[in-house]
Structure formats: structure tokens, C-alpha cells
Image (cartoon, helix red, strand yellow):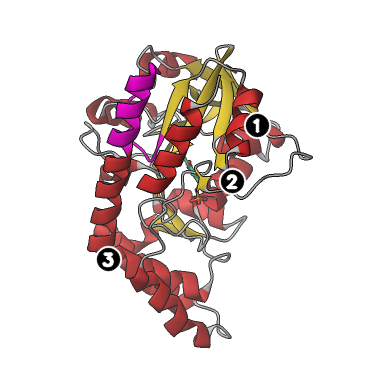
Amino acid sequence: PMVREYFLPDDLKAPKIIAKLNANENPYGPPMSAQKAVADSVKNGNRYAWKEMYDLIDKIAKKEGVTADHIMMGPGSSDLLEKVALVTFMKGKGNIVSADPCYMSLVQVAKSVGATWKPVPCTDDWSHDLKAMEAAIDSETKLVYVCNPNNPTGAITKGQDLLDFCSRVSEKVPVFVDEAYIELAVGADTQSMVSLLTQKKNVIVARTFSKIMGMAGIRVGYMVALPSYLETINKITRGGMGISYTSIFAASASLDDKDFQGNTRKLNHEAKLYLYENLDKMGYKYIPSYTNFVLFPVTIPAKELLTKLNAKGVSVRAFDILNKPWCRVSLGTMDEMKAFVGALGQLS
Ligand code: PLP
């Protein structure tokens, strides 16, 4: 693997964080509509929410253009990534193919129950090297994981290329496509892989309410897959069981709240342009991002970067990638971006 992440030492007493730019959260959420839905629904929290969840599933199914049996809900998409990893790899070994770098949550769980990870380096523009990924698949491969747009790079893989890849590869092995950031991919040549399910392709698409919907702490996500595939998961670990009554209503309200989603998209894009402009001024090169974060190489060691920014109340993520230090900064409010730019300018 080409990525190593660094963390602040535990004993480093954090000052007041004025710019929390380390977890790709949506600084504008949760939408008022969702807050109201939580408040209005909490009184019924003594009941299990099966009926209410099926109403939400119907709504999501309509939006995705599939039938309800194609949807499994979870408390965030992490739950579903982990369920798939566990169920796929708990019996016998096998390998998982993904890009490197990529979002490691599914891969980590797969590895911890015995899977071998076959990392495939990204191309020069940090998109998925689909040819090399296809070549890496062998008779032991049980799952292919694609994160598009990708984390931690923010880069995108072209929609049609990925569609062709998934269409072909899923004949041999299930392809899991994590689309956590897809709604934020302004101006990108991309598309959801959900359309492949109407052709009965064995793809699994994960979506989350944590990013565009601003509900990372409310915990709602879902995956769209073939009903027969979801049955294999459900047999072992039930979908939807970890999602709360209030979260279901929050999710339903935020789905309807197109104004909030549009506003998030717009403000996120403005924060990104402001960041680009200032990184340009300071001479930093960055990977063009189709998400709510930006990854760029820095000139001081990763741990020093974290420590110095933390001392100014700015929280980011830091990695060594290809043996060089990189900073991943989430796109926050304009005030947060100004704090970040100010702190970065005073580094060295
Ligand atoms: N997938 C990707 C690519 C992510 O970056 C994240 C969170 O940052 C997740 C999934 C998990 O998010 P959640 O569990 O909040 O849906």
C-alpha cells in the first residue's frame, strides 16, 4: 500500500478547534427540515420503525428507479460496507481488489477476517486504473471495491469508463461502488452505477446521507443491489436494524429538501474555488477535487503539519503517499477556509 496516515499524539492537548476540516462533514447541516422531523418523530421512539423504514425505502427506490427489494438501509453507509466485507470474507479466504489509494473501511474489515488485499495503484491523474484492476482479478477474487469520487484523493473516474468496467467485471465477481460523494461532483463526467441494476448486473452501490444531506451524526445510508445479493447479506446480518426512528424521518425530510442540497453544492463549490485560488498563490499543487475535500502535497512532514495546524485550531488529515507528505483538508464554511489558509500560510 502506498498510503500511511499520521495522527496527532494523544498527549497533545488540542486548543479550541475553530476549523474542523478532518472528516469531510457538511458544515451547513443538518437541514432545518430534518431537525424538525427528528423533533416531531421522537415521541414515537418507543416503537420499532419497520413500517416507517419501508416507507423510506419506497421513496428511495422511486428516486433510484428500482424496486424496493433492491434497497438495504443502514446507520450510515459504513455499516453496509462492513456488513458486505464480513459476509463476503467470513467463510474461507479470497481477495479483494481496489485502487490504492482508496477509502479503506471496507478493505480493512475484509482484511481483518482473512481477506488478502490486492491494491492497484491509481493512474497519473489519480483516477482508477480500470485496466490494471481488471487484470488483477483472479480465481480467488470475491469482491472488487471502487470508490468514485475517491477518498482521500477527491479524484474521479469517468462515468462511461466505469460503467463499462462494472458491466463487464460484474459478470465474474460482484463490484461494490461507493458513491458517498457523487452528489458533490460538480462539473464531472460521472454517473451513478445504479442503472446497471436494471440490467441485472451484480453491482452494489452505497450511498450516504452524511455528505450532501449534512447528517453524518444522524447516521443514515443505504445500498442498492440485486435482491438476491441483499438476501445473502440479510441472512447473516439484518439490514436496517441499526437505524433509529428519528433518523428515518430526518432522512425522508432531507431527501425532499432540494434547496438544502442545492445550497450545499453551491457553497461547497465556492469554498473549493477559494481554496484553489489560495493554494495557487502559495505555490501548492492539488488534485482537482469532485468532493468536499482537497488533497495536496506539502513540504513539511505529515506529523509536523498536523501539530502546527492543530496549534492554530485547525484540524485536517495527513498522509504519506508515495513517501511524500500530503494534507487532506475538508471544505468547510468560508470562515473555516480562511482559518485554514491563514494557518497554512504561517507554516514553515
Ligand atoms: N464511504 C466513503 C468514501 C467515505 O468517505 C465515508 C465517510 O467519510 C463513508 C463511506 C462512510 O460514511 P457514513 O458511514 O457516514 O455513511
Return the x and y of residue 136 as percentages of the image width and height: 49, 16
| SS category of the residue bearing label 2 | helix
Q: Which residue is mark 2?
A: 82
- Of badges 1 and 3, the one in the foreground is 1
Q: What's the amino acid at mark 3? A: Asp
Q: Quadrant of the N terminus?
A: top right
Q: Quadrant of the C terminus?
A: top right
| SS category of the residue bearing label 3 | loop
Q: Is residue 337 left or right of residue 276?
A: right
Residue drawn at x 34%, y 28% is 278
Q: Which residue is mark 3?
A: 257
Residue drawn at x 51%, y 82% is 42
Residue drawn at x 64%, y 39% is 109
Residue 280 falls inside the magenta stretch: yes
Residue 54 falls inside the magenta stretch: no
Residue farthest right in this picture: 11
The residues bearing labels 2 and 3 have C-alpha atoms spaced at a distance of 29 Å
The residues bearing labels 1 and 2 have C-alpha atoms spaced at a distance of 31 Å
Residue stretch rendered in magenta on the structure: 272-293
On residue 96, the disc is none
Q: Which residue is mark 1?
A: 307
Question: For mark 2, does the 10 Å Cα neighbourhood hold few (<14), some (14 to 19), or many (20 or more) residues?
Answer: some
Q: Is residue 152 left or right of residue 323?
A: left
Return the x and y of residue 262 as percentages of the image width and height: 23, 54
Does any portion of residue 199 appear in the rendered image?
Answer: no
Label whose residue precedes the other's in the sequence (1 or 2): 2
Q: What's the amino acid at mark 2? A: Glu
Return the x and y of residue 72 as percentages of the image width and height: 45, 58
Return the x and y of residue 47 as percentages of the image width and height: 55, 84
Marks 1,2: beta carbons within 8 A: no
| SS category of the residue bearing label 1 | helix
